[in-house]
Image (spheres, rainbow, N blue to C red):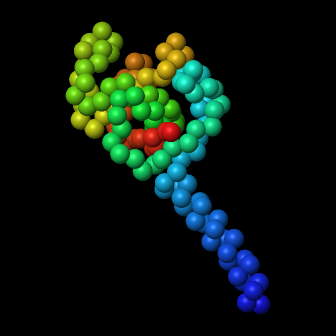
């Protein structure tokens, strides 16, 4: 009886441990569009970390935007000047301006009503 319980508990504990690691530390996702080509091909599986240092210009991030999870590259960080809809804007504190590597096929900061991604919306920094 005791061995039977151990044979059930060990796999359950391993499963719960792996599940918690992927919910809190690691990130696995799929790039649903061609917006990051040629760097990331459409339908590529990507890996990242949910715990990361402050993102820098050039980093690829996964983030929430209007209920969708998107993958883009940081083009400008706080204090940087960007041109948006013919106006010069300064990126606010704690926010980022993001672009897809494939500018012709990317729905990114250039097209949004609020062109910035808040640091709190970032889900992971990709490898």
What percent of the width, then of the height, locates residue 122? Answer: 41, 41
**How many dots with numbers?**
0
Please give left or right for residue 115 compared with residue 8 in the image: left
Q: Residue furthest front?
A: 127
Examine the image and state in which quarter residue 59 appears: top left
- Say if residue 114 shows up in the picture: no
Q: Which residue is drawn at 58% across and 65% down?
A: 17
Please give left or right for residue 53 compared with residue 13 in the image: left
Q: Residue at x 33, y 12 (%)?
A: 85
- Say if residue 49 shows up in the picture: yes
What percent of the width, then of the height, locates residue 73? Answer: 44, 28
- Residue 70 vs residue 2, the one in the foreground: 2
Please give left or right for residue 61 compared with residue 88 in the image: right
What percent of the width, then of the height, locates residue 39? Answer: 55, 25
Q: In which quarter of the image is the N terminus?
A: bottom right
Q: Which residue is drawn at 58% across and 38% down?
A: 46
Q: Residue furthest bottom?
A: 1
Q: Residue at x 63, y 32 (%)?
A: 44
Give the answer, above or below, for where 2 lies relative to 19.
below
Examine the image and state in which quarter residue 112 appears: top left
Q: Which residue lies furthest to the top in this view?
A: 86
What percent of the width, then of the height, locates residue 67? Answer: 49, 37
- Residue 24 vs residue 56, the one in the foreground: 56
């Amino acid at each position: 009886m005791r061995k039977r319980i151990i044979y059930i508990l060990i796999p359950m504990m391993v499963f719960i441990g792996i599940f918690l690691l992927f919910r809190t530390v690691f990130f696995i996702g799929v790039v649903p569009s061609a917006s990051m080509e040629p760097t990331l091909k459409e339908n590529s599986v990507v890996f990242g970390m949910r715990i990361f240092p402050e993102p820098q210009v050039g980093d690829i991030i996964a983030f929430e935007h209007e209920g969708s999870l998107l993958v883009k590259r940081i083009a400008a960080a706080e204090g940087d000047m960007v041109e948006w809809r013919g106006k010069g804007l300064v990126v606010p504190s704690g926010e980022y301006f993001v672009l897809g590597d494939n500018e012709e096929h990317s729905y990114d900061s250039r097209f949004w009503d609020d062109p910035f991604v808040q640091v709190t919306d970032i889900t992971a920094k990709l490898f």
